[in-house]
Image (cartoon, helix red, strand yellow):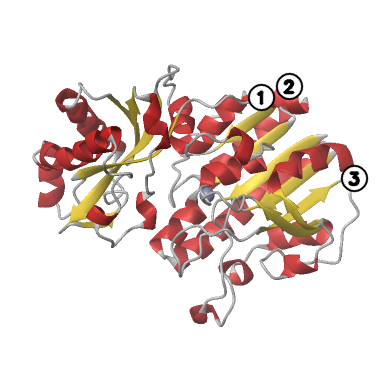
């Protein structure tokens, strides 16, 4: 049996006034998703446990078959893995965003989607200026890493910057503010401002009327997790295809191969066709492929309805289409389509709602559902389940 799990990050949404109370999934032209729904069975998956934040890390770990309550230690260490940064027993990895601060307000969690070459220069400058506190590592664009060798800092409370756009920075500092490590790290964030604003990169960005990356934002701390190997747990050789470090990092901890796709950016401009082609190729020598597409989530965070619909249509045409064609090459084939969580346009951040999903399998009789969206899936035969049971369900029940 070959398995494909296709994840449209943040794809699910709520009905929108400007769409006559329909969701982006309901109005997007997505013939392949609807065909998959009519050939398969639908339902809902709960990807985030009630007492956890609905981050992509928690949700994707769950989709990959691991109970986040048991295995999740924070977002930072997952990104560290994807960047090839090894953590010692006392290390705590923080995600380090480059952000734009304006009049005390968190204006942009991604500093106007700063380029990777610009962020590389800024990370170098940060390392030169703050080498007594820890080490910064350059990732992609605004997504970078900070490693702090104080084990206790893993318990600090931090806030994802994409959740507080437009809010006062002083109200969302690392908590508890009186704890020694929190004092050091909050000061580091504050001091980064002066260092960054004087950089050549930012002077040029300001001249070009672009948002400056004038502060760092530390969040998602955690030590390296101890996770059972996917191949040992499920006896399947697996791979990930993604433009996002976080998902790559989860895969690497699980022992999945990450397949680099030229042109996969983790943004609207990602090369959807290349992802589809590489996914089909990867099936030849893997049992299971997790194909993750970030674009609908980015559109949700940006509140950009047009881009969200476009992202859904591109996934349908250029990734799902070729993957559905590929099933003709295999006697036994299962394909699951789902978002990791909803990122509704009106809310501009992730929600806890269970996500609509479809399983198509050569071994599964279809139910009566004929379209893939948040409402049609309610009539599906799969009901509601927790996401970390999905892989077992595929292996044992199909
Ligand atoms: Zn996500």
**Residue 273 visible to the viewer:** no
Query: Which x, y percent locates residue 388?
Result: 70, 42
Horizontal relation, residue 295 to residue 146: left or right: right
The residue that mark 3 highlights is 363
Label 1 Cα neighbours within 10 Å, binned few <14 / some 14-19 / many ≥20? some
The residue that mark 2 highlights is 232
Query: Which x, y percent locates residue 60?
Result: 59, 43
Mark 2, ligand 1, within 8 Å: the answer is no
Secondary structure of the residue carrying tag 3 is loop
Query: Which x, y percent locates residue 161?
Result: 35, 50
The reply to whether the C-beta atoms of the residues labelled 1 and 2 are less than 8 Å apart is yes
Mark before the other along the chain sequence, 2 or 3: 2
The residue that mark 1 highlights is 228
**Residue at x 65%, y 63% (from the top left corner):** 30
Badge nearest the viewer, 1 or 2: 1
Badge nearest the viewer, 2 or 3: 2
**Residue at x 21%, y 44% (from the top left corner):** 215
The part of the image, by quadrant, that contains residue 188 is: top left
The part of the image, by quadrant, that contains residue 115 is: top left
């Amino acid at each position: 049996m070959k398995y494909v799990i296709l994840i449209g990050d943040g794809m699910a949404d709520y009905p929108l006034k400007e769409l006559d109370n329909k969701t982006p999934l309901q109005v997007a032209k997505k013939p392949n998703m609807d065909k998959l729904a009519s050939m398969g069975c639908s339902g809902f998956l709960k990807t985030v446990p009630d007492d956890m934040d609905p981050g992509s890390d928690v949700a994707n770990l769950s989709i990959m078959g691991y109970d986040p309550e048991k295995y999740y230690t924070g977002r930072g260490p997952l990104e560290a893995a994807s960047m090839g940064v090894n953590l010692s027993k006392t290390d705590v990895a923080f995600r380090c965003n480059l952000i734009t601060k304006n009049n005390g307000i968190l204006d942009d969690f991604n500093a106007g989607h700063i380029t990777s070459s610009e962020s590389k220069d800024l990370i170098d400058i940060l390392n030169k200026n703050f080498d007594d506190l820890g080490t910064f590592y350059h990732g992609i664009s605004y997504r970078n890493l900070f490693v702090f060798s104080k084990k206790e800092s893993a318990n600090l409370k931090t806030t994802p910057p994409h959740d507080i756009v437009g809010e006062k920075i002083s109200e969302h500092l690392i908590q508890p503010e009186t704890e020694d490590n929190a004092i050091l790290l909050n000061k580091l964030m504050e001091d980064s401002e002066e260092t960054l604003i004087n950089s050549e990169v930012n002077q040029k960005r300001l001249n070009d009327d672009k948002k400056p990356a004038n502060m760092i934002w530390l969040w998602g701390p955690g030590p390296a997790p101890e996770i059972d190997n996917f191949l040992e747990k499920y006896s399947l050789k697996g791979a990930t295809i993604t433009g996002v470090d976080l998902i790559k990092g989860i895969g690497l901890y699980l022992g999945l191969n990450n397949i680099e796709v030229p042109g996969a950016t983790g943004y609207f401009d990602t090369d959807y066709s290349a992802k589809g082609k590489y996914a089909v190729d990867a099936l030849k020598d893997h049992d299971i492929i997790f194909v993750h597409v970030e674009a609908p989530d980015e559109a949700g965070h940006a509140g950009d309805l047009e881009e969200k619909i476009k992202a859904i249509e591109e996934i349908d045409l250029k990734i799902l289409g070729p993957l559905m064609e590929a099933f003709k090459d295999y006697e036994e084939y299962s394909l699951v389509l789902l978002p990791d969580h909803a990122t509704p346009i009106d809310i501009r951040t992730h929600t806890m709602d269970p996500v609509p999903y479809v399983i198509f399998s050569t071994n599964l009789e279809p139910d009566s559902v004929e379209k893939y969206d948040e409402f049609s899936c309610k009539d599906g035969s799969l009901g509601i389940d927790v996401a970390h049971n999905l892989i077992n369900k595929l292996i044992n029940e199909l």
